[in-house]
Structure formats: C-alpha cells, structure tokens
C-alpha cells in the first residue's frame, strides 16, 4: 500500500496538494520517522501518525503599539530602527514589521536615530485621509529635543527653504521654494542643556535638526549637524501626534513620555 492511500483513507476529503504540504511540514511520520513522499510504500503493521499543525502566536513587534483599530495603527518607534526604505533593503524597518501582520500604508517618517510616534493606515480610505492631513498640515506633530547650547531666545519660529546636499544632509538656501517652518519653546534649562518642545508646521527631511543647528542650538547626539556627542545617541523624540480619524472624523491626540535615554 502507498502512503497516499493510507492518508486518503484517514482524510477522505483532503486534496493531494494538502497531503503533500502536510509531508513538507514534517507532520506525517511512519514508525516515528518523517515521511518523504506520498508514493512511499508502507505495510499493514506500519504506524502512520499525522501531527496537528503547530499553532503560531501573534508576530512579536520590535516596538509597542500605542493605538490600533480597523483603520489606523500608531506605534512608538525606537531609536535605531528605520521607518521604511527602498525595496530589497536587508535592514529591518517599522513598515516591514507591521506588514508582517497585514496590509499597512506609510504616511510619514521619523529619522532612524529619532524615536516616537508614527501613524500608519490599514485601509485605502485611511491612507488617502492621512496623506491629505499631512500634506495640508492639519496633522500636528510635536517633538522633544535636548540641545546645547540653549537657543538665543526661549521661544521662536524658524523659517527657511531647505535643500538636500549630496551627503544626505539638508541646509537652508537663499532662493525661492517651499518654506520649512519650525516652532520651538524652551521647557527647561539644565546647565548648558535646554529641553525644547518643537512643533512642526511643515515636515521636511531633517527639518528640526537643520533648523536648530542653524539657530546655534544643535541637538545633543546629532553628529551630522554639529551636536555634542552623547552615549545615548540623538536626543530627539516625537512625543505628541494629533490627527483626524479617517472614519469618525474625530480629533485624536496621542501622547507619550520621552524615552529613558533622554532623561537629564
């Protein structure tokens, strides 16, 4: 008798392809030895066993989920993790981790070395709604940054046209273009350090880092823009996010504490 016949007797409604997958998964054994082929010959006294499929738990994510429903998911991205990148990128990203759980859409980014709140869409309608909110600046993003030395004024706004150089850094240029606008407020000063609350009116690459550096108050740990070295890396975190829910249209506010690495 062929193993196939024995399995069909036990699972009469199963398709041959299903039985083949059971073998490939190592679920079928003959006398305690994993079977290798459906056409394997077996005898009357041979013991054929089919193990139940292994249950897989939920995929573990390398970050906490702050909020999730059928339309959106908000996470707290850790420093050092890319938000997303190009196809075939071998390094892990937040987007790739979430796509292991289902369909999600990219809305905005955080620098790899920054941490904090990111929102992703879970439906086509949510993607369109959130993209529109970020494009029209109705979504609010608030950061906490530690800078040294402190800014010349405790509160202010920086406006400039930013241009990216070949080395990946961005800098203000004196030409016409779309303004990048950053608002800041000093929360507290600790010696030569200042803790700032920074609100983005626009969202350009490295906007906060470039603007604070050009103001003379670079972020601690920001080697690209002249910041003091720090063992805990870039002292920048997205701590508040405000959006309109794509379905209910309700204003939603998400807040988190700055990470422990930014304690001063």
Image: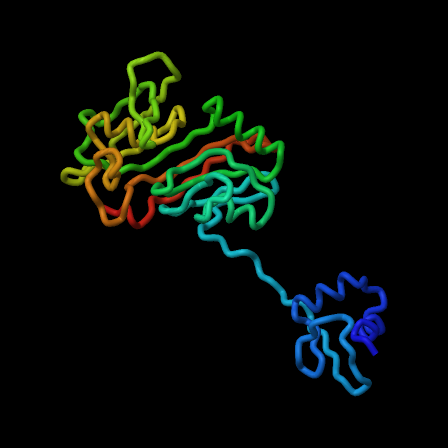
Q: Residue 91's x, y, as percent?
A: 43, 48
Relative horizontal placement of residue 228, taking residue 135 as reference (left or right): left
Rendered location of residue 51, percent (x, y):
69, 73
Identify the residue at horizontal 62%, vertical 34% (top origin): 124
Query: Which residue is found at the position 54% from the left and 56% from the top?
Result: 59
Colouring chosen for the image of the structure: rainbow
Is 60 on the left-hand or right-hand side of 124?
A: left
Quadrant including the N terminus = bottom right
Pick the residue in front: 97 or 86: 86
Of residues 55 and 197, the one drawn nearer to the viewer in this rendering = 55
Q: Nearer the viewer, residue 28 or 229?
A: 28
Residue furthest top in the image:
176
Q: How many marks?
A: 0
**Residue 112, image x, y percentages:** 37, 42
Q: Residue at x 72, y 78 (%)?
A: 49
- Seen in the picture, residue 22 relative to 122 is either above or below; the reply is below
Position of residue 67 relative to residue 199, above or below, is below
Residue at the (38%, 30%) spot, across then down: 205
Residue 261 image offset from top left, x and y in percent: 29, 49
Q: Is residue 126 above or below residue 113?
A: above
Furthest residue toward bottom: 45
Q: Residue furthest left?
A: 191
32 sits to left or right of 4: left
Quadrant of res 147: top left
Residue 211, quarter of the rendered image = top left
Reply above or below: 207 against 61. Answer: above
């Amino acid at each position: 008798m062929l193993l196939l016949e024995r399995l069909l007797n036990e699972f009469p409604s199963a398709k041959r392809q299903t039985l083949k997958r059971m073998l490939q998964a190592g679920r079928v054994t003959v006398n305690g030895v994993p079977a290798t082929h459906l056409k394997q010959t077996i005898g009357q006294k041979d013991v054929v066993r089919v193990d139940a499929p292994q249950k897989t738990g939920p995929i573990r994510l390398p970050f906490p989920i702050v909020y999730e429903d059928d339309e959106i998911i908000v996470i707290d991205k850790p420093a050092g993790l890319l938000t997303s990148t190009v196809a075939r990128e071998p390094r892990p990203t937040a987007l790739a981790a979430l796509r292991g759980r289902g369909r999600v859409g990219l809305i905005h980014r955080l620098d790899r070395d920054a941490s904090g709140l990111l929102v992703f869409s879970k439906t086509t309608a949510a993607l369109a709604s959130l993209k529109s909110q970020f494009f029209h600046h109705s979504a609010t993003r608030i950061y906490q940054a530690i800078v040294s030395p402190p800014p010349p004024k405790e509160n202010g706004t920086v406006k400039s046209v930013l241009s990216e150089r070949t080395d990946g850094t961005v800098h203000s240029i004196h030409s016409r273009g779309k303004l990048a606008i950053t608002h800041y407020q000093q929360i507290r000063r600790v010696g030569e350090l200042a803790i700032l609350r920074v609100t983005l009116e626009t969202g350009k690459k490295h906007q906060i880092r470039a603007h604070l550096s050009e103001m003379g108050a670079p972020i601690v740990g920001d080697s690209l823009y002249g910041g003091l070295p720090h063992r805990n890396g870039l002292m920048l975190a997205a701590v508040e996010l405000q959006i309109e829910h794509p379905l209910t249209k309700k204003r939603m506010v998400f807040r988190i504490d700055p990470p422990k690495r930014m304690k001063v």
